[in-house]
Each structure stands twice: as C-alpha cells, then as structure tokens.
Image (tube, rainbow, N blue to C red):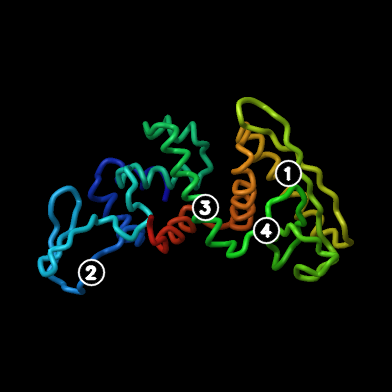
Amino acid sequence: MNLIELSKYLQDEQAAENYLYEKEILKRFTVCPHCGSDKLGHISRGRIKCYKCKKEWHKRKGSFLEGKQISASKFIAFLKLYADEYGVNRISEELGIDIKSVIELHSKIRCEVINAYYKTKPSINSKYWLYIVNNEIEISSRNIDNNADPITSDYMIINFERTKEFGNLYSFLIDAQWVGTKIKYKSMLNTFISYIKMKLISYRGVKVEYFFEYFLETIIKYNNRGSSFLNIVSEILSKSKGG
C-alpha cells in the first residue's frame, strides 16, 4: 500500500474500518460468542448486542485493537509508518498522537511480530551467536560449540556494550568476531552487522529492557527485506486474540 492508496483510508473512517475487516485485523461476528445465536444487532458506541442472551460486547473484541483508543484510519496510518521504519517521535508528530501512546502501541506491535517468529526466544545476555540457515539470519545465546543449536562451523560471535547517553536511554556498541571458512556467509553476516549498527544509531538510544526486542525485530525485517513488511505485520495482527 503506497501513500496514494493510504490517503483514501485517512479521509474515510468507514473505508478504513472495512479495510481492517478485509485484512481480518478486526473480527466479524455472525453469531454470539456467548450463546451462539445469530440474533445480533449493532447498538451505540460501537457495541454489538445479542438479542437472545442480551449480552453486549465491543466490535473490536478478540482483535489486536480490543481496548485500544485509536481510530481505524489512524491505526492504518500507524501500521504504514511502522512498516516504513518511522521513529516513534516522527509517528507522534505525523498522526497527532501523544508520544506515550505511540511508544505503547509500537511496543505491542513489535511484540506480536517477534512472537510470530520466535516461539522460544534466546536468553537475554550480552553475547550471541549469529549464523545462516536457508539464507536467513538466525540467532542464539548458546554456544554452538556445545551443540546446543543447529550444527554449523560458520558463525559470528557478537558482544554488546552499552554506554550511557541521556536519561535512561543507552547507546549500544557491537563487537563482532567471525568464525568459519565460508566467505559467502561471512559477507552476509557482515552486511547484517552494518545494517543493525545503522538501525541502532537511528534509534538515538534505547531502554535496556527493550534493546533485545529491537534487535530481534531488526533480524525479522532484514530476513524479510524483499517482501512487503506492511503485509507481513497485517497478517500477524490478523491472528492476534486481543487483550
């Protein structure tokens, strides 16, 4: 979706909502989730009522947007800016949303994306092993020499060092050491290291507790650099159960 296609959703809230239904980010209710009746009706303030059991619920129930106070049109714009790697300050300015809300929504989307790719996340520490599987970057916090991961003799050991920048935000320095003989893999990993260094500089400091999330997110974006990340994120959010 380019900016021209995006504009029609920003100007029409109903069109934006229909788009989210088409992408299955919003769920359609054909029967009552409480009693199974199809005697449903839309009532005020975006709520749905079952005329059999008399229960009511919001139309965003069971979706990623459940409980979130953002319009459908601004949410689509948010997804586009997120996929295009706009920073939280820029998103806040562009959409007129307070920075705290932007950071919270950005974090929730990032977690959904990470959880879709990493069912078991590497443990949090300062040393990691990067290697290539099927031409994609893989990561582990366990030593490959101990056979805890897929066997490979070509990998890169990376260490992170943090330096205080301002407030509770830190800059992170990367020290990378190549181990192996396959020049192709070395070149791919070096390209990724250059990419992640560039991304870390653009963040202008991150909180320590969020750093590893940013790192995993960057691996995912790098591995999907030939695809539409907006479509990938939309598909992931269509599977969200809300909350």
Whichever of callouts 3 and 2 sits on the residue coming sooner in the sequence is 2
The kind of secondary structure element at disc 2 is loop
Dot 1, how many residues are within 10 Å of its Cα: few (below 14), some (14-19), or many (20+)?
few
Residue sitting nearer the eye, 14 or 159 = 159
Pointer 2 residue = 34
Find the distance from the CA under tag 1 to the CA under tag 3: 24 Å
* Residue that carries the numbered disc 3 in the rendered image: 111
Label 1 sits on residue: 194
Q: Position of residue 35 (x, y in %)?
A: 20, 72
Residue 122, label in figure: 4
Seen in the image, is 148 located left or right of residue 153? left
Residue 66 or 5: which is nearer the viewer? 66
Gap in Å between the C-alphas at discs 1 and 4? 22 Å
Which amino acid type is marked by label 4? Pro
Q: Is residue 92 left or right of residue 210?
A: left
For numbered disc 3, what is the local secondary structure? helix
Label 1's element? helix
